[in-house]
Amino acid sequence: MKVCVTAVAPSLDAQIDPRFGRCAYFIIVDTDTMSFKAIPNTSASALSGAGIQAAQTVVNEGVEAVITGNVGPNSYQVLASAGVKIFTGAFGTVREAIEAYKAGRLREAFAPGFGPGFGMGRGMGRGMGMGMGRGMGFGRGMGWTPPSPPPTPPPSPNKEQEIMMLENQMRILQQQLEEIKRRLKELRGE
């Protein structure tokens, strides 16, 4: 079975890149043989549409599942419509993610906006209740059926894993900042 894992480097021992559309690499792994192909994500620096372009790249590889940290609604739509299963909340190395997948320890993602809310809830409660009941298909006469029970969220990373994830994200952000600076210099003719 072919599975795609987002990664920060072209290796099975690379850390998972938590961003799908703007990840550095797609590692396409044959789960039976652990042979792999690393594809640089050419849409990572796109000004817009990176998620859709990234999803199409993965779909074109014929993968059956994607393992990543997070996937946006546009990417989700492209992947899901192609029949690709999506697993989010992954951390650690590509190899560890594949082993967790093979052992059945990963949970399939909900469509964005339809899963359990894990946000911080910082709203100020100032809505005026003027909505028309059209959000998420729960309006009047929409044929609503109760949702399936939510899956158990993935276990929280331990302290070392969280440090590793944050250091990865810091390196990725530094790389993005350097790329932005380079592009600005290029545009300014410096």
Image (tube, grey):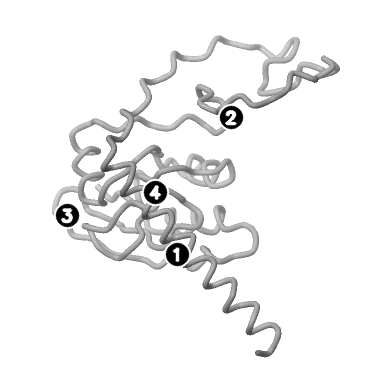
The image shows residue 119 at horizontal and vertical percentages of 55, 28
Residue drawn 84% across the image and 17% down it: 128
Task: Please name the residue that numbered disc 3 is placed on.
Answer: 34
The residue carrying mark 2 is 113
- For badge 2, the amino acid type reads Gly
Q: Which mark is residue 41?
A: 1
> How far is the residue under mark 2 from the one under mark 3?
33 Å
**Please, what is the three-letter code of the amino acid marked with disc 1?**
Asn
- The part of the image, by quadrant, that contains residue 112 is top right
Please tell me whether mark 1 or mark 4 is closer to you in this view: 4
- Which residue occupies the extreme left position in the image? 33
Q: Which quadrant holds residue 157?
A: top left
x and y, in percent, of residue 4 in the image: 34, 51
* Label number found at residue 166: 4
Mark earlier in primary sequence (2, 3): 3
For the residues labelled 2 and 4, the Cα–Cα distance comes to: 25 Å
Image height check: is 40 above or below 106?
Answer: below
Residue 153's place in the image compared with 76, above or below, is above
Q: Is residue 18 above or below residue 44?
A: above
Point 27% across, 35% down: residue: 158
Residue at point 24% right, 31% down? 105
Mark nearer the N terminus (4 vs 3): 3
Callout 2: SS: loop
Mark 2 vs 4, N-terminal side: 2
Quarter of the image that includes the C terminus? bottom right
